[in-house]
Amino acid sequence: METGVRKISTFIEEIHIEGGKPAEKPITMVVVAAVLKNPWAGQGFVENLRPEILRLAPVLGEQMVQRLTAIMPAERVEAYGKAAMVGVNGEIEHASALIHTLRFGNMFREAVGGTAFLSFTNSRVGPGALISLPMIHKSLTGHRSHFLTATFQIADAPGPDEILIAIGAADGGRAHPRIGDRFIDMAEMDSEKASA
């Protein structure tokens, strides 16, 4: 199927030392990003985005998940997220359309055994913009240790009539998490209310 993909870029980061202290094990983050022609470019305002969503999202999701899990096997994935950036001639809705559908997100969730929603960013940017891809634990959304952000950029993307979509995964949380989980806060706040 013709997807209009111009390029696919992969980014791998390994964190060995944080705050001057070695990590117990290196933490790896992987991002797979696809740059494609905006299928709605040049058409003015398009009311119904669904036909292109149905055509593209499942195919892109499957291809990108295969690439990511070839680098980081599914059983290693602890945290995940996604991002979509549209070029300056497009609408943010165009970028959002390709990632905010279960036909895209479920490919990733099911492949890595996740149950949590995929945290995300979506925005309009020019080529070479620094892109932030947020992640959370794939199942335990209150684990702040896995509130991570992968940052990357592609020098020539997205072009004005392009969309850049990305998925990211990490095989651990931050190197030295020390701020506790949301669950701890919730229990403490409930206890404070009860004793007040």
Image: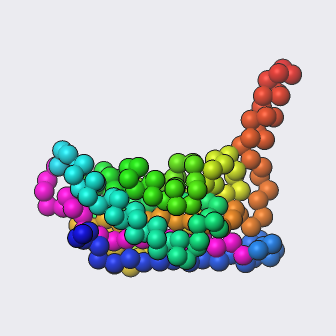
| Residue appearing at x 40%, y 62% in the figure | 61
Compare residues 118 and 56 and report the one nearer the observer. 56
Classified by dominant secondary structure, the portion drawn in magenta counts as: strand
Specify whether residue 34 is painted magenta: yes
Q: Is residue 93 visible?
A: yes
Compare residues 160 and 83 and report the one nearer the observer. 83
Using residue 145 as the reference point, say whether residue 133 is left or right of it: left
Looking at the rendering, which quadrant does residue 28 occupy?
A: bottom right
Q: Quadrant of the N terminus?
A: bottom left
Compare residues 153 and 63 and report the one nearer the observer. 63
Residue 50 percent across, percent down from the top left: 25, 48
Start and end of the magenta stretch? 26-45
Residue 118 percent across, percent down from the top left: 51, 53
Using residue 129 as the reference point, say whether residue 42 is left or right of it: left
| Residue appearing at x 46%, y 67% in the figure | 65
Using residue 179 as the reference point, say whether residue 5 is left or right of it: left
Residue farthest along the left direction in this orientation: 43
Specify whether residue 93 is painted magenta: no
Relative to 91, does residue 163 appear above or below in the rendering? below
| Residue appearing at x 78%, y 28% in the figure | 190
Residue 139 percent across, percent down from the top left: 63, 50
Q: Quadrant of the C terminus?
A: top right
Relative to 152, does residue 184 appear above or below in the rendering? above
| Residue appearing at x 19%, y 58% in the figure | 40
Using residue 141 as the reference point, say whether residue 62 is left or right of it: left
- Colour convention: rainbow
Residue 182 percent across, percent down from the top left: 71, 43
Q: Is residue 88 visible?
A: no
Number of callouts in the render? Answer: 0
